[in-house]
Amino acid sequence: MHELGIHTAKILIITAREDTGRLIHSMLRLAGYAHTQLAAGVADILSLSAEHHPDLIVLDAAYPDADTFFLLEQLRAQVSNGIPVTVLVFGELNTSAKARALTLGAKDFLPEPFDHVDVTARARNLLESRRLYERLTSQSRYIEERFGVVNREMDDTQIEILERLASAVERRDDETGEHVRRVGENAALLARELSLPQDEVELIRRAAPLHDVGKVAIPDAILLKPEKLTLDEYELMKSHT
């Protein structure tokens, strides 16, 4: 994804801690995210979310005027009504609270004290994954509506979307992105050894890199966690298949 596309995203920061909110707001603005807003009152939160359709919500887990999980449930209800939202939670949460937040739609957790590189990197990764996923979903929906089934003869645009989505997912835990390419090439070699038709070999080469595409829905806090996963985190990790 081009940086310009990411930086046009709408970001809503939800916190009653004015200094904290302004700090995150400044960090994101300096990184080029011009469409960033602050929300304080609970009524403002839900109305702003419904009105402006943010691409990313940065939510304070220690919100004093409302239960964090209540807010997550309300935001998830908006998603079911056709308003997709990616939620990045910051503030102190224990392990069980984090697990509950994940089930309610949180995608990642931002540790305090804040670091400019960490804040902007997490925002960029979440927005990039979401944009790529939306493009893939949009292409698939268009094909299904027009033809009834996904056409196996993918054009160059669809192939690029798939390849970039797979590469974006892989780069979350493999900076080179070479793993997905190697998987595709090795799968094609095996297909040739099995004497499959050339068109099937090519299809396998293109499709094999998507074997871990489900990672796009796994938060960085779990996918990149250096310690042993909790049982709840492990269950979420298994869902990527």
Image: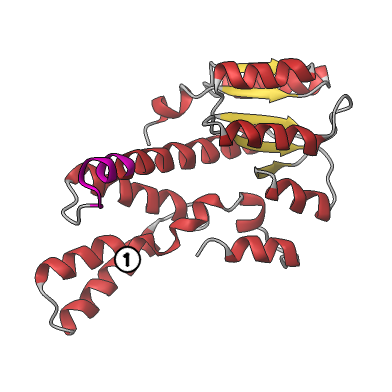
Mark 1: amino acid: Ala
- Side of 105 relative to 82 (left or right): right
> Is 1 positioned to the left or the right of 116 in the image?
left
User: In this figure, which colouring scheme has been used for the structure?
Assistant: secondary structure
Question: Which secondary structure class fits the magenta region best?
Answer: helix
Check the image and report above or below for 92 versus 10.
below
Task: Give the residue number, with chain letter if any, for mark 1.
Answer: 208
Say if 188 sits above or below 117 in the image.
below
Residue at image coords 40%, 41%: 132
Q: x, y (%) of residue 115?
A: 70, 35
Q: Please say if 8 is above or below 97.
A: above
User: Residue 123 lies in magenta, yes or no?
Assistant: no
**Residue at point 25%, 60% (across, down):** 206
Q: Is residue 154 left or right of residue 236?
A: left
Q: Which residues are magenta?
A: 141-150
Give the residue at x 64% y 23%.
12
**Hey, which residue is sitting farthest bottom in the picture?**
194
Measuring from the top left, give residue 40's x and y in whole percent: 78, 17
Name the element at disc 1: helix
